[in-house]
Image (cartoon, rainbow, N blue to C red):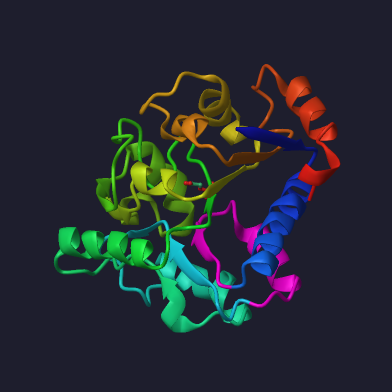
Amino acid sequence: MEIIIQPTEADSVDIAARIIARLLREKPNAVLGLATGSTPLRLYRALIAMNLDWSQVTSFNLDEYVGLDPNSPMSYHSFMWANLFDHINIRKDKVNIPDGTAKDIPAFCAEYEEKIKSAGGIDLQVLGIGTEGHIGFNEPTSSLGSRTRIKTLTPQTRRDNARFFDGEDKVPTHVITMGIGTIMEARENLLLAFGANKAHAIAQAVEGPISSINPASILQMHPQAKVCVDAEAASQLTRSEYYKWVYANKPAWQRL
Ligand code: PGA
């Protein structure tokens, strides 16, 4: 894992945006895995401002609420179009987001996995982290080998996401999410976390044991995982000085 600690969210986002911009320049037909929630919002704004060419890019989103119509303002379909896709030249037929209204959810999930495979696999997956360590909506105790499937949200996640809805009881109970095994097959993972409310989950993910209790901790097994955090999200890490030193001393050829 490469832990990149920056003073502020804006500094972290600058690095994450440059990582993605470099990928799109080197591989114009890249396959990107994308995330929703508050965390990637600034990143998407930065990417829009960079005016990159997305015409050959394929995207796969991590997750979606079960039962929400794609046109619902709370759906992750709406989120992605409003916050990114409507502002870049990505082709609609290259955008993939789980369908929370699928009649046959297991069949839909198997098809989603197949689509990822036939697109050549995900080059870079953007991830946020839940306050209990979820990636995608793989809640604590999710199988570390799981594939795209239906999951039940924890009460904590429903509380955390109530701000996007008209109260906690309106937050759907179920979601479709890429599995941890799916995420681990991305060639590169880029986990972003900002703010003190993510500090515990980040400390467990980076310095705790690998455990399904903190699903993000599986990224310790990934050969290309970067964790981009601001000072607050890094505040419970015990080896911050070391991570900063490593980043400051990267060989020139490894720099962005
Ligand atoms: P947030 O959610 O970006 O809204 O904090 C992160 C997550 O649940 O993965």
Asked whether 6 or 210 is in front, the reply is 210
Return the residue found at the far left: 104
User: Is residue 40 inside the magenta stretch?
Assistant: yes
Asked whether 71 or 252 is in front, the reply is 252
Drawn side of residue 38 relative to residue 68, left or right: right
Name which residue lies at 33% across and 34% down.
Answer: 144
Residue 110: quarter of image: bottom left
Name which residue lies at 72% across and 52% down.
Answer: 13
Which segment did they paint magenta? 29-53
Return the residue found at the far front: 253
- Residue 185, image x, y percentages: 42, 47
Residue 74 can be seen in this image: no
Name which residue lies at 72% across and 64% down.
Answer: 46
Residue 9 can be seen in this image: yes
Drawn side of residue 6 relative to residue 129, left or right: right
Name which residue lies at 27% across and 60% down.
Answer: 66
